[in-house]
Image (tube, grey):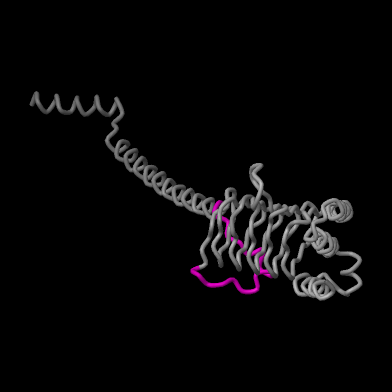
Amino acid sequence: MFGQMKRDIQVIFERDPAAKSIWEVIFCYPGFHAVIFHRMAHWLYLHDLVLLPRMISQLSRFLTGIEIHPGAKIGQGLFIDHGTGVVIGETTEVGDNVTLYQGVTLGGTGKEKGKRHPTIGNNVVIGAGARVLGSFKVGDNVKIGAGSVVNKPVPSDTTVVGVPGRIVLHHGVPIKDPDLRHDDLPDPVNEMLKCLMQRVEYLEERLKEEESRYNVFEIIQHHDTSKRRVSPKRERESCDVRMRSDDL
């Protein structure tokens, strides 16, 4: 228990540059408090106690805003940053060196008993407000973007973003220092908007070219018409001249 507590404190210093001292972590980090409460509740849960672990879980929820069911299996080095609104269901399994941000839900779907919550691999980062719902595995070295909704298995060494979650491959290259790169996420919607804006700019340029070409054509046409235009008086005079020449 104390060895795990030491590791839980250590990961906070590794992943949160705002942490300044051990006492600050012990007294001021709700994510750390929630993990400690859960380790005690889980130990009691494994010894076939039901009510007391749930009471500890409820106390932890009241104090930290983080709800972890006593039945959930949590590995070493779990870091819950900020923490408010985090929910971890009964049959959830979380690997080592996992980082969760505020508002994350590791939940189930349906009312069936047995395994109904996700299994999270090692070195996984789950961004703020993300939802991982259902009984499936999220591989190692995975990043899940803020606000994403994931409801199907995720292979290792990938990034998931969007609603529903879409996998962005990284060519099989493992993500290095995933806990420090949770903000480096591609946004397919943003990329699509950029393409549309580029297309609009291209079409606007073409339209300007066509307008300038049309204006030049109008100027030339107007110039030719002006040249050919003859006033009525001059036209009568020319007709008189032609008539005199005919009489001669």
Q: Is residue 174 left or right of residue 228?
A: right
Identity of the residue drawn at 46% across and 47% down: 204
Q: Is residue 133 left or right of residue 236?
A: right
Between 199 and 170, the one nearer to me in the picture = 170
Image spot of residue 138 (x, y percent): 60, 60
The quadrant of the picture occupied by the C terminus is top left
Identity of the residue drawn at 56% across and 59% down: 154
Image spot of residue 16 (x, y percent): 78, 70
Between 237 and 25, the one nearer to me in the picture = 25
Name the quadrant containing residue 13. bottom right
Identity of the residue drawn at 61% across and 74% down: 176
Name the quadrant containing residue 222. top left
- Main SS of residues in magenta: loop
Indicate whether residue 177 is drawn in magenta: yes
Image spot of residue 230 (x, y percent): 28, 31
Q: Magenta residues, as a range?
A: 171-189
> Against 73, is 178 above or below?
below
